[in-house]
Image (cartoon, rainbow, N blue to C red):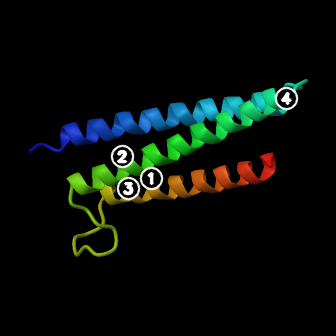
C-alpha cells in the first residue's frame, strides 16, 4: 500500500486544524475588542470559542493517532531511526499540548 494517500489525508486534516484555529483566534480577538452590551451574548461567544478549540484539539489528536497507526510508528518504543514522519507526529502532539493549555487558560479567564 502506498503511503502517499495517507500523507495527503494527514495534510488535509492539518489544514482543517489550521482553519479551525484561525477561526478561534478571530473569535478571541473579536470577543476582546467588541464591547458587548449583554452578558448572555458575551457568554455565548466564550462558549463558542472553547467548543471550537476543543473540537480542534480532538480532531488533531484523532488524526495524528490515525496517521501514526497507519505507518505503525511509535515514538518511544521503536527501534527504527528517527525520521521526518516521527518529527511530524511529535510536533502534532506538542501542538495539541499547546491547544490544551490555551483551552485551560481561556476557561479560567472566562469564568
Q: Residue at the far front: name it.
A: 40
Count up the numbered dots: 4
Vertical relation: 71 (above or below) 54: below
| Mark sitting on residue 33 | 4
Q: Nearer the viewer, mark 3 or mark 2?
A: 2
Vertical relation: 84 (above or below) 55: below
Vertical relation: 98 (above or below) 25: below
Mark before the other along the chain sequence, 3 or 2: 2
| Mark sitting on residue 92 | 1
Q: How many angstroms separate mark 1 from mark 4 (CA)?
A: 30 Å
| Mark sitting on residue 63 | 2
Mark before the other along the chain sequence, 4 or 3: 4
Mark before the other along the chain sequence, 1 or 4: 4
Q: Is residue 90 left or right of residue 107?
A: left
Residue drawn at (68%, 29%) of the image? 26
Mark before the other along the chain sequence, 4 or 2: 4
How many other residues sit within 10 Å of disc 4, few (<14), some (14-19) or many (≥20)? few
Residue drawn at (51%, 58%) of the image? 94
Amino acid at each position: 500500500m502506498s503511503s502517499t494517500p495517507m500523507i495527503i489525508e494527514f495534510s488535509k486534516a492539518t489544514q482543517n486544524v489550521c482553519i479551525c484555529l484561525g477561526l478561534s483566534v478571530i473569535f478571541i480577538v473579536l470577543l476582546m475588542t467588541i464591547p458587548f452590551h449583554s452578558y448572555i451574548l458575551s457568554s455565548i461567544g466564550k462558549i463558542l470559542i472553547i467548543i471550537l478549540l476543543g473540537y480542534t484539539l480532538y480532531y488533531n489528536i484523532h488524526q495524528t493517532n490515525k496517521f501514526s497507526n497507519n505507518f505503525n510508528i511509535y515514538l518511544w518504543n521503536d527501534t527504527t531511526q528517527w525520521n521526518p514522519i516521527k518529527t511530524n507526529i511529535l510536533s502534532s502532539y506538542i501542538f495539541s499540548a499547546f491547544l490544551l493549555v490555551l483551552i485551560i487558560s481561556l476557561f479560567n479567564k472566562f469564568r
